[in-house]
Image (cartoon, helix red, strand yellow):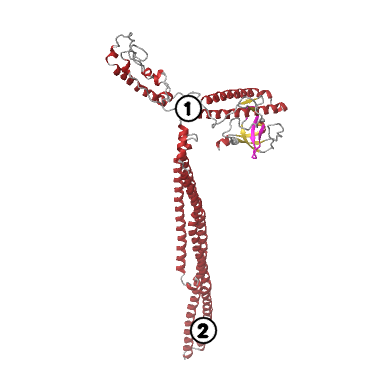
Amino acid sequence: MDWGTELWDQYDIIEKHTQSGLELVEKYVKFVKERTEIEQNYAKQLRNLSKKYNLKRIGKDEPECRLSSYQSFLEILNEMNDYAGQRELIAENMMMNICIDLTKYLQELKQERKMYLMEAKKAQQSLESTYKQLDSSKKRFEREWREAERAAQYAEKTDQDINATKADVEKAKQQAHMRAHVAEECKNDYAAQLQKYNKEQNQFYFNDMPLIFNKVQDLDERRVRKLAQGYILFSDTEKHVMPIIGKCLEGMTKAGTNVNERNDSMIVIEQNKSGFERPGDLEFEDYSQGINRASSDSSLGTPKGPLELLGKNRNKNFWLFSKKSKLSPSTLPPFSTPPAPSPANGPSSPKFGRDPLSYCLKEINKTVKPRIHSFRTLRRSPTVTEDFTHLPPEQRRKRLQQKLEEICKELQKEVDQSEALGKMKDVYEKNPQMGDPASLASQISQTSQSIERLKGELNKYETWLAEAGGRGDTLRYKSHTFNNNGAHDILGPDGAHSDESTPDPSQAIYAEFDDDFEDEELTAPIGKCTAMYSFPGASEGTISMQEGEVLAVVEEDKGDGWTRVRRNNGDEGYIPTSYVTISIQQMKDI
């Protein structure tokens, strides 16, 4: 069944139905657009929430960064950020695959429908025009036939009239004959027009309009099928990203299971362990036993300050009052000037003699309270020393180890620079036209001084680490010596040269960490350069390049006329700065 056969006379209904179908497509497109806006806003809010709680301002060296609970929280934020990205992907796919595609298809349907309706109207107008011609010929035939009948009647009447002349009779007959001939022609014309109209009407109702209606039906069915595909895509778009969303949710679950409360407690202990011993019991000092004795070290006949009264505990490892904050006499409030000692067996001081015990307790109370206040002040702003003696023993060892690592890295950097200067000096000596070797003397001397200074600091901090009680399970550092060419040799624990061959300059000069050492990453490029001329790079330490070749800049020209560059394959070397055009600022902006 099709529209051309069953709905041959329902042109208005078909037009209204197809228009309603197109409006439904427009309504669905608008619905999907609003859904994408909701997804985008949701993703944006999730990203803002993740950014708000990510706390990027906290550095990686902060103590809480090592806690598994903190790491898991960061993983949850990252997974939520990825989840937001999947919501954005849903919105983007819906917009591309549904909204844009359906909108484009809708425009094509509108144009096609408009063309079919215009064809139907044109066919209808043609049929109406033929009908008008038929009606005109019919009316003319009717008019001429009546005129012919009147002319025949007049000729017959004239012929019977005895008073009419023969000429009148003949004239009336000719007029009647002429009218009859015209009426016959109008009849033939009417018959032809009628035949033509019937033929066109048959063509209109049985061929033209059914064909147009069938085309409109096919258009409407294609519209419905495309709309159904849009309905399916609405769900499939989200189904396609559900596995990734599931992985994000699994990542959040895994982050929760990775939390190890016991390990976090161990980390807190490791980060904050002081290494002090617990304080021992304070000894009871009975002041009543020495009231009547002669003045001596234990006699209360001459009142002493709190530090003297508590002198026996001065060497105790008491956290709050000894090693956590080292007090100098200047930080303590001035004590009351004690009275002059009385002679042996003499009368005691009037102030002390009345109530010796009350006086001692009063003196203790007067001094202990300000002392607590001064400790709080000291804990807020402790005096930082170079050897970190202001820290507890355990923390001091860790800080000394960190300092040793920093010095070793600086030392390695200076050694690399010294080697580079040595190579450039060799290049200058072999190719004087490229530079003056004497111009590098100041830099080589400065680098050597820096190496000696860092070696001194390294030895100093190693000594302090040994004093702090560095153990074998911590980083094991090796001493190094450097020759004039910038190479370095490893010394054994006894100071003698080991049997190992001279290591590669890129090898780290400081210790192994439990025999597990990872090479440092390649230095990040700071810019790029384009070769204006070709350079053979035949000397040691240099690298060849071709005109127009683009290289990454690893180290800028330090005034010696050479720039350190790297190819994409990892090859590094020095090239003449004047041979290239360098763009550093662009890379920094990026």
Above or below residue 261? Residue 503 is above
Q: Badge 2 local density, few (<14 within 10 Å), some, or many (20+)?
A: many
- Asked where in the image residue 557 lies, by quadrant, the reply is top right
Query: Residue placed farthest to the left in the image?
Result: 354
- Asked where in the image residue 348 lies, by quadrant, the reply is top left
Amino acid carrying mark 2 in the image: Ala
Q: Nearer the viewer, residue 386 or 292?
A: 292
Residue 393 tag number: 1
Above or below residue 199? Residue 336 is above
Q: Earlier in the sequence, mark 1 or mark 2?
A: 2
Amino acid carrying mark 1 in the image: Pro
Q: Is residue 515 visible?
A: yes
Name the quadrant of the C terminus: top right
Q: Nearer the viewer, residue 276 or 284?
A: 284
Residue under numbered circle 2: 180
Magenta residues, start to end: 557-575
Residue 233: x percent and y percent?
50, 57
* Residue 23 forms part of the magenta stretch: no
Q: Is residue 95 visible?
A: no
Q: Nearer the viewer, residue 25 or 498?
A: 498
Which type of secondary structure does the marked residue at label 2 adopt? helix
Residue 536: x percent and y percent?
71, 34
Residue 241: x percent and y percent?
50, 52
